[in-house]
Image (spheres, rainbow, N blue to C red):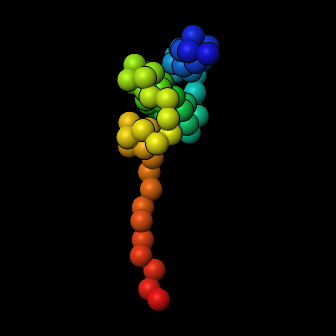
Amino acid sequence: AWDKQSELLLELVKLTTTDLNKSERQKLMCAITLDAHNRDVQERLVKEQVVSPEAFQWQSMLKAYWTEEDG
């Protein structure tokens, strides 16, 4: 799965050398950024041997906000 993910990311990078309009290029660059970030996060979790969703390393990746409701 790791190799396939890397191959797909490289294919996205190769697309940047093709003739794209501004909107297509922006979408492609956004996809590359997200995929590269996800790859880096997964690599770090594997290296740190995170196996539980309760692990701090995993939970630190989550984006959540706590709001107190009145009443």
Residue 44 x, y percent position in the rendering: 39, 24
Residue 62 x, y percent position in the rendering: 45, 46
> 1 above or below 52?
above
Residue name at image x 44 percent, y 56 percent: 64
Residue 18 location, quadrant:
top right
Q: In which quarter of the image is the N terminus?
A: top right
Residue name at image x 44 percent, y 86 percent: 70
In this orientation, which residue lies closer to the viewer: 64 or 6?
64
Residue name at image x 58 percent, y 27 percent: 20
In this orientation, which residue lies closer to the viewer: 10 or 17?
10
Residue 49 location, quadrant:
top left
In this orientation, which residue lies closer to the viewer: 40 or 20?
40
Residue name at image x 54 percent, y 32 percent: 31
The total number of labels drawn is 0
In this orientation, which residue lies closer to the viewer: 28 or 7?
7
Q: Is residue 7 visible?
A: no
Residue 47 x, y percent position in the rendering: 40, 19
Q: Is residue 2 visible?
A: yes
Judged left or right of residue 59, residue 4 is right
Q: Which residue lies furthest to the bottom in this view?
A: 71
